[in-house]
Image: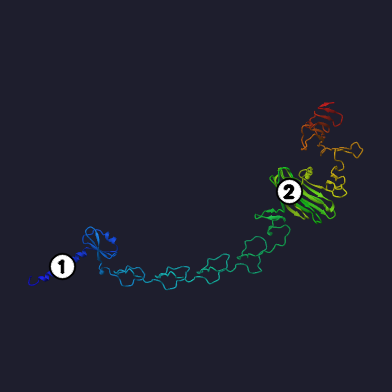
Amino acid sequence: MINGYSQDIGQLQADVIVINTELARQTHFRGYFTTNDEILELTNPAIGDYTYSAEDLLVWDYDGSQWIETDKIVPDQMTPASDANPLSDDTVTAGTSAEYSSGDHIHPLNISTSVPISDTADGTVGTSVNYSRSDHSHPINISTSIAPQDSTSGSVGTANQYARSDHSHPINVETNTSNIPIVNGVGANGSSALYARQDHVHPQQLTYDGNVTATKFIKTGGTANDVLLADGSTKQSSIASKTFTVIDPEQYVKLCTNLAVNSTTDNSIKFEVTTRTGFGQLQFNQHWTTVYGISEYQYLFIPTLATGISKAWILYFNDGVDRYGELWCKIDYYSYNIYIYATEVSAFQALSVTLQLMVPLMKVLEQAETQQIYEVIYSSTGNNGVNQLGFIIVKAAYEGTNSGLQINQYGNVLNFYGKMSSGNIQINPTATGYDDGLRISRADPTSTGNSSIQLGCSRTSTTGSIDGQWTIFTPPSSSTNNPQNFVIAVSSQAGDNNRGLQISADGNTLTFNGRQL
């Protein structure tokens, strides 16, 4: 002890040690870290280094090989907590506070207490820093004006309001009762901005000036049976029609019955035919008079090409005003599908468009020539004065006791104009002259026509020759070989000068196979 100061020196030495220890401790302090993983990743640690963890609020020491979590709690003065309320969100700033927020801190609501504004046409970014509540609503931005009518040119508009879902435009139709739809006339685009009502009606076109015109929705030259199509063409409507399939045999078809009773005009009907080889047409006009009933007629007949319909007949029944006619046609063999349409009817009284098949008895009409229509009375005579209860086929207006082809009521006598009877055919001349009997003229014209009798000819063909067929004939005056001679020869040799039995035109020379006798 030096003069009693040894105790004070020892205290000073102890204070120096405490100061050095604290300085050393602060030298090894590595700082505050949010997580333990950040502490474990510190580089170049040294013995004595330590740090504070905000994750578990414990002190960590480095023992020379690894970081060790101690049970020492981070001093309070090192983890201060702010007692102030958190600020509301506002313009961003870094802040200067060194205090932490408590785990259960709450920011004040940063919401607006103003009513949201309505939408505008241009919109705006705005300056408010407040948020909108989730249950906020904008004022309805709708118009209280009535919606305008549609216009010809339309308009973008300037209103900033929306239309209500139940809005309606005023009706854009003509309400003036004096302005009615225009009658059919010359086509025009029009200038009206109004729509037509669903139940609007155009005025009727009640008059026509002769030929109908397209301005009246009917094509020029059309008939009451024409239908105007969308492309401007016309098509005839069908009054009646039927399809026939004919292969073998041919079929006879009754087209219609004409009962022209008390008619003031002629009656007309038109049929059109469609086949696989083309078309055909039959137009028939019947004249009627008060005194005589059915009388004259006219027709237009266009037969079909190749197979189809090539023959037609008008058959008359009864006499006088009770007389009526039936129009018939024949469908040829192998015509296949035939379509017959009745396309026009004019002033027919009690017309029956039947398109019925005829019974086989109609085959008697096959004797008629091709491509013509024939006027024939074909009927049972009834109880009258001409062949009572018999059957007659005769040209109209030539009815009589000895007219046409007639069968008596018993069916055992056949007469043809009073000159042919049934059984073996016998000719009984009514005059005593030497020129009565069987008379055969030359074909017309007589200067170029033959006159002949064919024996042993074909039973099915009316032309040509077959084996065993003989010809008795006289050539015309214009013939090069034996003009107007009398010849009996085998048919196939009839044109040969040196064959057959021949008598010269003057009757003076007889030859046989070219040898004069």
Residue 500 locus on image (x, y percent): 81, 29
Q: Reply above or below: 135 against 363.
A: below
Residue sitting nearer the eye, 419 or 91: 419
User: Would residue 230 appear left or right of 163 to someone viewing this image?
Assistant: right
> Can residue 221 be seen in this snapshot?
no
Residue 269 locus on image (x, y percent): 76, 52
Tell me the residue at 78%/50% (across/down): 326
Residue sitting nearer the eye, 362 or 183: 362
Residue 216 locus on image (x, y percent): 69, 59
The residue where tag 2 is placed is: 281
The residue where tag 1 is placed is: 16
How packed mark 1 is, by other alpha carbons closer than 10 Å (few <14, some 14-19, many 20 or more), is few
Q: Reply above or below: 515 against 363.
A: above
Give me the C-alpha separation between circle 1 and circle 2.
Answer: 144 Å
Numbered disc 1: secondary structure: helix
The kind of residue tagged 2 is Gln
- Total marks placed: 2
Q: For the N terminus, give its image quadrant.
A: bottom left
Q: Reply above or below: 492 against 69.
A: above
The kind of residue tagged 1 is Val
User: Would residue 205 appear left or right of 288 to someone viewing this image?
Assistant: left
Numbered disc 2: secondary structure: strand
How packed mark 2 is, by other alpha carbons closer than 10 Å (few <14, some 14-19, many 20 or more), is some
Upstream in sequence: badge 1 or badge 2: 1
Q: For the C terminus, give its image quadrant.
A: top right
Identify the image quadrant of residue 311: top right
